[in-house]
Amino acid sequence: MARSFGRLSGANSRTFLESLFEILPLVKESKGAILPNLTKKERTMLTMFFYTLWGKGLDDLNQRFSSMEAGIYWAIDDSLLYNELIDLLRYQYEKIDFVDKPLKLGFETPLNLYCAYTLDQILVALGKHTESKRAHFQEGVLYLSDKDLDVFFVTLNKSEKDYSPTTMYKDYSINDELFHWQSQSRTTVESPTGLRYINQHTNKTNVLFFVREYKEESGITSPYTCLGLADYISHSGSAPINIIWKMENPLPGFVMQKTAKL
């Protein structure tokens, strides 16, 4: 629970927090019984919270729990911890000082523009993690072919102890609309991946950006801020490819403070 509190200390999505205010009391009252009337979106957010607690799916926990509700109830059964959790979520909710926007990806998702999420929460929201199984993911790029979606996870200030020389990418905002992004070092302009990036308009694929300033702060893995969709503008070089993307939504001031490096 202590680690979970740390991960929740970056939560700032009204949609996610409001859902937890509704769902967690139901889990508590039912003592972990399966909640039958949740919508698909609510079920997804319940799964996001389960991964925030455990970092694994039900099968990964060797069937320790019969359901996610049971696993969550095990953690919030103690009233002192439960009240502390609700206080933390309410504190996070009340200090939100920006206006988020729905993220339109062509499929239902609880993700909102400008909000911060842990990597596990994002992978749940995009359907990569399931209730049962945590998907293997280590790299900073993710291609979901069934959704025609490329997802980029950008860490702006990279520490040499955390990243090899081949992964010290040069990623930064040029202004509140344009973002310079560098592909993985092995990606060439002739590769299927490189061609998909460069021919984004022709292929009609979407590119979604998530950005964080540091990999870790105060001993806690940093969440990613959702910057939304972007369109290809130009590129240079190969292995890696340097690409200029235009964000569909201008970067707000608090994001610019984190991303502007020029």
Image (cartoon, rainbow, N blue to C red):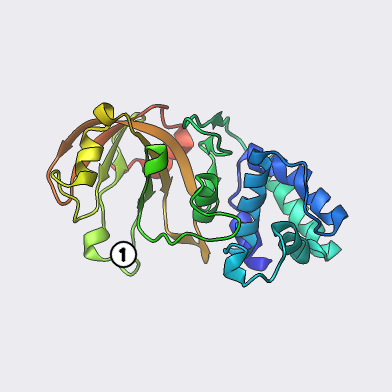
In this view of the protein, can residue 235 be seen by the observer? yes
Q: As rendered, which of 116 and 214 lies closer to the eye?
A: 116
Q: In the rendered image, which residue does mark 1 sit on?
A: 163
Q: Whole-percent x and y of residue 204?
A: 32, 29
The answer to whether 214 appears left or right of 12 in the picture is left
Counting every numbered tag in the picture gives 1
Q: Which residue is drawn at 28% across and 35% down?
A: 174
Q: As rendered, which of 242 and 60 lies closer to the eye?
A: 60
Quarter of the image containing the C terminus? top left
Q: Residue at x 26, y 58 (%)?
A: 168
Quarter of the image containing the N terminus? bottom right
The answer to whether 104 appears left or right of 145 in the picture is right
Q: Whole-percent x and y of residue 228?
A: 44, 35
Q: Quadrant of residue 60?
A: bottom right
Q: Give, as a three-letter code, the residue at label 1.
A: Tyr
Image height of 13 relative to 201, above or below: below
Q: Whole-percent x and y of residue 123?
A: 50, 51
Q: Is mark 1 on a helix, strand or loop?
A: loop
Q: Whole-percent x and y of residue 154?
A: 37, 49
In this view of the protein, can residue 95 be seen by the observer? no
Q: Residue at x 15, y 51 (%)?
A: 239
The answer to whether 188 appears left or right of 146 in the picture is left
Classed neighbour count for the residue bearing mark 1: other residues with Cα under 10 Å, few (<14), some (14–19), many (≥20): few
Image height of 110 relative to 49, above or below: above
Q: Residue at x 71, y 49 (%)?
A: 89
Image height of 74 relative to 240, above or below: below
